[in-house]
Amino acid sequence: MKELLQHAQHIVIFTHMAPDGDAMGSALALYHWLGGKPEVIVPNAFPAFFNWMPGADRIHVYEKEKAACDALIAAADLFICTDFNDPKRIGPMGDKMLANPCPKILIDHHLNPTDFADEVHSHPEASSSCEIVYKLLFGDKSSISNQQSSISNKVATCLYTGLMTDTGNFSFNSTRAELYDIIAELLRAGVQKDAIYDAVFNQYSEHRVRLTGYALYRKMRIYPEHHLALITLSADELDQYHYQVGDTEGLVNMPLQISDVYYSVFMREERAKPGTPKSRIRISFRSQGDRPVNIWASEVFHGGGHANASGGEIFGTIGQAVRLFEQTYKTYLK
Ligand code: 5GP
Ligand code: MN
C-alpha cells in the first residue's frame, strides 16, 4: 500500500452511497493524511450534519457533477475504496471505476467483499472502517507512517467521527479494549470528542425532531409474535416535515428501545426520478443479538449488509414493499 501511494499522482477516494459518518471519516482522514491531494468522490449527497467535517467542502458529489467526476475517474492512477465491499455500492461510478485498470485499494469492514481490488484490507471484526484506517496509518511499527506522533488534528477528528457514529456512540460493536487505546491516541492528537458529538447529534432542525415524533407516534406498527417493528414514511409525509438528507438517520434504531422488540425495519419513499416510472423504497433493517437480518435484506430486498444492520430497496409503492415484508418476515425471522 505504501508503494502504491508513493507512486500515485492522481488518487481518487470513493465511499458509499448515502454516506454515513464512517464513510465520510475514513475517506476524509485518508484525504488529509495524503496532504489534501486526492479527490474524494461520493455517489450522492451527504447529510448537512457532516458539513463541519474538515475537508467536507472539497468532496465531489457525483450526482451533482457527473462530467467532472467522470474525467477524474478516467484520469486516476489509484483508487481507494473505503467503507464498502462491492462496486455496486457506489452506483453508476462502480462501472466507471472498473473500466480504469489502475490499482485499487479496498479498506472496509463489511463481510465478503467482491473480488475487485488489488490490495484488500477487509476486517469485518473492526468497529468501523475508520478503525482500519487508523491501524493502517498509525497502528504499529509496520504501519505506513511509522511514527506515533504524526496524527494531525484533522485526521484524528475524521477518524473519531467514524468510530463514534458506526458504534452508536460506543453502544455496539465496541467491546474490544484496543478500540479505546485508539481513542486515547486520538484524544492526545487533540480530538474534541464532546464537540464532535454535539455537531453530529445535537444540531437537528425542529422539523426533523417532529418528523421523528410523527413516525414513532403515528407510523410505527408492531408485530408482537415476531418482536418486530415497522415504520414507513411516504414522500408526501416527508415533504410535510421538510425532509432533508439524513433526517431519518437513526430512526430505525428507535423501536429497539422497546423491551420486546428485537427487529426493526424502516421504509422511506423517494419519488421517481424524471424519466423513471417508479418510486424507490429505501429499506433499513436492524436487529439485536443472534438474529441476522442480512439474508432477508439480500434475498427479498436486493440489498445486504451486516447481520444486525442491513439495507435494501425495491422500486414500486410503499404498499408493495409492505406486502412483500408481510409475506416474507415469518420465513426469515426467528
Ligand atoms: P442503512 O440502513 O444505514 O442504510 O444501512 C445499514 C447497513 O446495511 C450499511 O452499513 C451497509 O452495510 C448495509 N447496506 C445498506 N444498503 C445496502 C445494499 O443495498 N447492499 C448491501 N450489500 N448492503 C447494504
Ligand atoms: Mn462503516
Image (cartoon, rainbow, N blue to C red):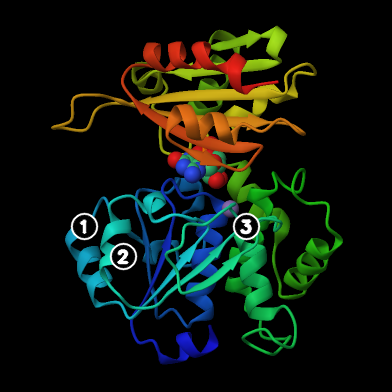
Q: Can residue 205 be seen in this view?
A: no
**Disc 3 designates what residue?**
161
Q: Specify few, some or many for label 1: CA neighbours under 10 Å numbering under 14, 14-19, or 20 or more.
A: some
Q: Which of marks 3 and 2 is nearer the N terminus?
A: 2
Residue drawn at the location 55% of the way across and 29% of the way down:
296
Marking on residue 279: none
Do residues under tags 3 and 2 come within 8 Å of each other at their CB atoms? no
Q: Is residue 225 above or below residue 92?
A: above
Percent across and percent down for residue 103 are: 39, 78
Q: Quadrant of residue 168?
A: top right
Marking on residue 98: 2
Percent across and percent down for residue 6 are: 46, 91
Q: Which amino acid does label 2 sit on?
A: Leu
Q: Quadrant of residue 150?
A: bottom right
Q: Specify few, some or many for label 2: CA neighbours under 10 Å numbering under 14, 14-19, or 20 or more.
A: some
Q: Single out the mark in the foreground, 3 or 2.
A: 2
Q: Which of marks 1 and 3 is nearer the N terminus?
A: 1
**Disc 1 designates what residue?**
66
Cα distance between the residues tagged 1 and 3: 28 Å
